[in-house]
Each structure stands twice: as C-alpha cells, then as structure tokens.
Image: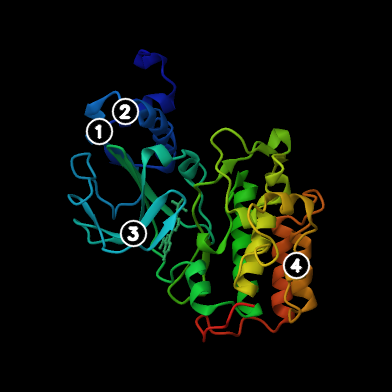
Amino acid sequence: KTPPDKLSMDEFLVDALKGSVILGEARNLACLVKTWKEDGLSSKAKPQEINENEGVLLIEKLKAVDYEYREDIHWTKFQGLLGTGSFGEVYKMEDKQTGFQCAAKKMRIEHFREEELTTCTGMMHENILPLYGAVKEGLWITIFMKLMEGGSLGQLLKQSGYLPEDRALHYLGQALKGLEYLHTHNVLHGDVKADNIVLSGDGNHAVLCDFGHAAHLHPDTMGNYLMTGDYVPGTETHLAPEVVMGKRCNAKADVWSSCCMMLHLLNGCHPWTRYYNYPLCLKIAKEPPPLREIPTSCHPSTAHVIKAGLEKEPAKRASAAELRLKANRALKHVGGLKSPWRSEYREPR
Ligand SMILES: CN1C=C[C@@](O)(C#Cc2ccnc(-n3nc(C(N)=O)c4cc(F)ccc43)c2)C1=O
C-alpha cells in the first residue's frame, strides 16, 4: 500500500472516497469509477465487498445519509422500466428524503465500462443528458441522470411509424449539436441511434444519452481509435464501414450513425434491413452507402445532408459541425418545424 504522502492528489481522493457516498464533483466521480472495474473482477474473492456502498452524488437533491446511499433505504425505484440502455435497465427513481425524482440506470458491475462515466462527467451541454451521480452497491452500479418526460426518440418512432421530414431534421440537428460538443471534447459516443436520444415533455428538446459505448479519442493519433479491448460495438445497422472493417476510427463514425438514425426516422425501419439479411457487416463494408433508402419525397437539401453524412471514406464525410449546418439549412428549406410531435401512426415505408 503506497504511503499517503506518495499518492497523487487523485489517488489520495480515491483512497478517501472508498467505502463512502459523498456529495462531490465530477472529477471525484471520474477518479472513483476507475477502481470499480478492478473491484468487479476481484470482488468475487472478497465477500465483504458484496454489500459495500460507495459513490459520488453531483447534485444536492440526491442526499447521502451517513456516507451511504442505498436502494430502498435512501432512494427507491418506481415500478416499470423507462427503457433499457446498453447493459442496463432505466427506471424513474425518487430520493426518499427530498422527494426529488430523476432517472436511474442500474447494471451489474461486470457490464460496467468506466468510459460510460469518464466520458460524460463534466459534460455540460443542452443536447447532452445531464449526469447526477453514480453509486456502487455490492455488485450493482446505479447511474443517476436527469429525467426526460418525453421518453426516447425510439419510443416516439414506434408510436408514429415514421416521422415527418421537418421533425426528423429537427431531431437530427439537435443530435448533431450534442455530437459536435462531444467531438470537441475528444469523446466518441459510439452508439448514436433513436433509442439513445431522449426528449423533453413537449417533445421539442432532444438530448443524447447512453455513453455505454463511448470512448476517449486521443488527438495525437488524429483522434483515431482502435475499437479493440473492452470496446463493445454499437448497433450493427448503424455501424460505419471503418468500424465494421476494424480500422482505426474517429468522431466521423458517429456522423455515419447519425445519418443511419435519420433514415430510421424517415422510413420507420433500420437501414440495410429491407435489402439484406444479418450479419450486415460485410454489406456495410462492401456495398455503396444506402442512399437508395432516402425517401423520394424528401427535399433535395435533406438528401444532400444524408449523402454528406454517409460518405464511406471518413476523410470525405462531413463533420458533426458541418452536417448540423446542412441539417438546419434543409429544415429552413422544408419550411421549418411545423408538424406536431405526436401524430397519427404512419405505416413504415
Ligand atoms: C448521462 N448518462 C448517464 C448514464 C447514461 O450513459 C445513460 C443512459 C440511458 C440509456 C438508455 N436510456 C436512457 N433513458 N434515460 C431516460 C431519462 N433520462 O428519462 C429515459 C426515458 C425513457 F423513456 C427511455 C429511456 C431513457 C438512458 C447517460 O447518458
């Protein structure tokens, strides 16, 4: 055990945090989560850790009591799932002391990737889901986040069949704003899709969520990231060609996925699936981009957005910032956001 005077500040903080739940800052949480994977692997050996409770809460409305924050004692889940994220279930929860309600994603420690938290701690943007904290209780990790009453875009799509062009462009533009922010901070989201966009109560404000596939991009290697090690690929129909070919990839992989999501919003079905059977990886690598899936009814500017985001060559593909400008221009060309957010069901195309 390193003597305290030899620890770095972060290691010192983690040493102090172990075994407690405190109200703290994003960087405290980022340090602590790095120890959870090791605990997950080794805790089978140490039964006393089975009931250990530690973590960092980032807002005052979530109140630890005597350095503990335990399910059913200090907070409680509402019945029924809000949704399922990568390797976890998402519930509405309530703090028993303050009555504050938010969303909570609960998962086994074996499925926890530290990047889910290290990539979103400290992220503050109107199109990124705010993180409220995370605690470990035995072999379970619970991540707290802002509750979005409008549910997910994936759920809206299931209820609507497919979305009108103006609404699809509106959500694509907001997702691209969130991606632009993440990419500026050298973070790859890794699983951009309708299920990972959640909506405000009026359906007009969309935020990106689920950092379970996220990765830190290292600017020195031109931000190119090798999807290896514990990387878990995102949704197959939305994977970029460079990802399915196991090449080094960068933020442009999220841009490709955002346009696969756009096709899903406009058609009501995932790209590739109407023309090919699984596994799709070989088709995504070999075939031209799925531009034939752009509805013929779309405005030329909308088709231009999707073409710019579905360039197979990452270097030729538009960046999130460039594509956002194109999406906003296309939204103007189709007359702006006019369609209501919930409307009669449209049979998928
Ligand atoms: C900041 N942060 C922390 C954890 C995180 O990686 C996640 C997630 C995730 C995954 C899938 N689904 C939802 N999800 N969240 C809500 C909500 N907040 O209200 C929600 C509501 C639904 F109706 C369906 C799924 C939902 C949230 C992340 O991004």
Give the Cα distance between marks 4 and 3: 35 Å
Q: Residues within 10 Å of mark 4 (few under 14, many from 20)?
A: many
Dots 2 and 3: beta carbons under 8 Å? Answer: no
- Find disc 3 in the rendering and name its residue: 91
- Residue that carries the numbered disc 1 in the rendered image: 50
Where residue 45 sits, quadrant-wise, is top left
Does label 2 or label 1 sit earlier along the sequence? 2
Specify which label sits upstream in the sequence, 4 or 1: 1
Q: Compared with residue 250, is residue 154 higher up or lower down, i.e. above or below?
A: below
Identity of the residue drawn at 37% across and 24% down: 12
Looking at numbered disc 3 in the image, what kind of residue is underneath it?
Tyr
The three-letter code of the residue at mark 2 reads: Ser
Dot placed on the residue nearer the N-terminal end, 4 or 3: 3
Q: In which quarter of the image is residue 235?
A: bottom right
Residue that label 4 marks = 305
Q: What element carries label 3?
A: strand
> Residue 237 vs residue 232: left or right?
right
Tell me the mark number nearer the camera, choosing from 4 and 2: 2
**Residue 48 position in % (x across, y down):** 22, 28
x, y percent for residue 92 = 32, 61
| Contact between labelled residues 1 and 2, with CB atoms less than 8 Å apart | yes
